[in-house]
Image (cartoon, rainbow, N blue to C red):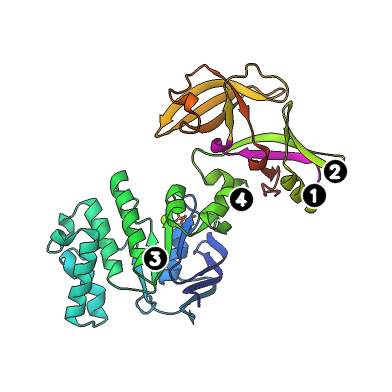
Amino acid sequence: MASVNLKGITKVYDGGVVAVRDFNLEVDDRQFVVLVGPSGCGKSTLLRMVAGLEEISSGQLYIGGQLMNRVEPQARDVATVFPSCAFHPHMTVYDNMAFALKRHRLPPHEINRRVKRAADLLGITPCLARKPAALSGGQRQRAALGRAIVQDPQLFLMDEPLSNLDAGLRAQMRAELSRLRQRTRAAFLYVTHDQSEAMALGDWVVIMKDGRIQQAGTPREVFDHPANLFVASFIGTPQMNFFDALLVKQAGAYYIELADVRIDLPPMTQARLADRGIPGQEIRLGVRPEHILPRPDEAGNGAGSLGGTVVDSERVGSALHLRVAVPLKGCAAQDVALCVSTGELPLHQGGIPRGSWLSLALPGGLLHLFHRESGCNLL
Ligand SMILES: Nc1ncnc2c1ncn2[C@@H]1O[C@H](COP(=O)(O)OP(=O)(O)O)[C@@H](O)[C@H]1O
Ligand SMILES: [Mg+2]
């Protein structure tokens, strides 16, 4: 049975703001689901409804198979890590972590065992006797996580729990969350605005915009097959490149025209377009920076090839991030981002200097074709 089942959940705030609209989602035991989207898209509202801190306007919320719409937060068997849930300032960290357990009347030795174990796991044992005010930001965030862990709930709800941490601590906490996952049967509903965090942590990613689900899938699915332009531009760094292009259907075969460059499509893509009865049309063409291949040996911007001048060249780890100004026939020049793995192209170990001319190859099999108006993925 799914740990959490959201059916047609909608939230209309007083004053008429529709923060969440007809939201459907199932979260299973042990599943780590991440809600991700830009600020204001309704992530926190949704999480707060599941926690019982916000009334559900319509729809049904089930936790462990039970309808929870009108159940008190304390009776939902969820543990929360929310930015707003403050510590009791006059209590020690230990007592803060033990608070919910005492309320549930757990035996003292069990409370002690759980708090000590969580503190150990999170590396905050030396902080247990302190008051919350005497913790650093990172320690406080760990204590908040610890307070959730000790409750051993069937569902964790976490709203941007790593947002106030510096990069190093964030990476460490990510690893700790992964370890926590392996030790519990609980489900996770985790909110972040950071797509890279979502992609790293989630085994199911739900991308939201304006209170609606845009796409839900594994990190791989939403990266490889974005449902629409919004998802395509939101997921992945550097961002996907987009071009206005033409999908041409001629004698039953499809190809793409980008300015005066013809790009052939592999048989599988052609078959899919044909199956779906897609007519030739103006499209938005998407291609990820990782999928563009530079060909430095070819000079000129002849017909059939795309090329431009390197305007930015930055080494990021073992990859080279380039920005290339590409003059397109009949259009303004367009900046194109690409990432080149220096490992794969030993030629570029030393970098590609600004001002170099690069020919670019767009691989037909890795292109994304979007409907110009609706933004929907045509494949
Ligand atoms: N208490 C509230 N009253 C009215 N509108 C609210 C309230 N809380 C949030 N909103 C609005 O609901 C929308 C979603 O907000 P929120 O759930 O906080 O988004 P997110 O967490 O994704 O940034 C926003 O338009 C926000 O302004
Ligand atoms: Mg929020």
Mark nearer the viewer, 4 or 3? 4
Q: Label 3, label 1: how many angstroms apart (C-alpha)?
A: 44 Å
The magenta span reads 278-291
Q: Which mark is residue 157?
A: 3
Q: Does residue 329 lie above or below 338 as drawn?
A: above
Q: Position of residue 311 (x, y in %)?
A: 51, 21
Q: Tell me, yes or no, whether the two marked residues, 1 and 2, touch with CB atoms within 8 Å.
A: yes
Residue pointed to by mark 2: 252
Q: Position of residue 248 (x, y in %)?
A: 79, 37
Of callouts 2 and 3, the N-terminal one: 3
Q: Tag 2's secondary structure?
A: loop
Q: Tell me, yes or no, whether the two marked residues, 2 and 3, touch with CB atoms within 8 Å.
A: no
Q: Residue at left 39%, top 59%? A: 159
Three-letter residue code for mark 4: His
Three-letter residue code for mark 2: Gly
Q: Position of residue 42 (x, y in %)?
A: 49, 58
Q: Label 4, label 3: how many angstroms apart (C-alpha)?
A: 28 Å
Three-letter residue code for mark 1: Ala
Of callouts 1 and 4, the N-terminal one: 4
Mark nearer the viewer, 3 or 1? 1
Q: Position of residue 119 (x, y in %)?
A: 21, 64
Q: Which mark is residue 190?
A: none
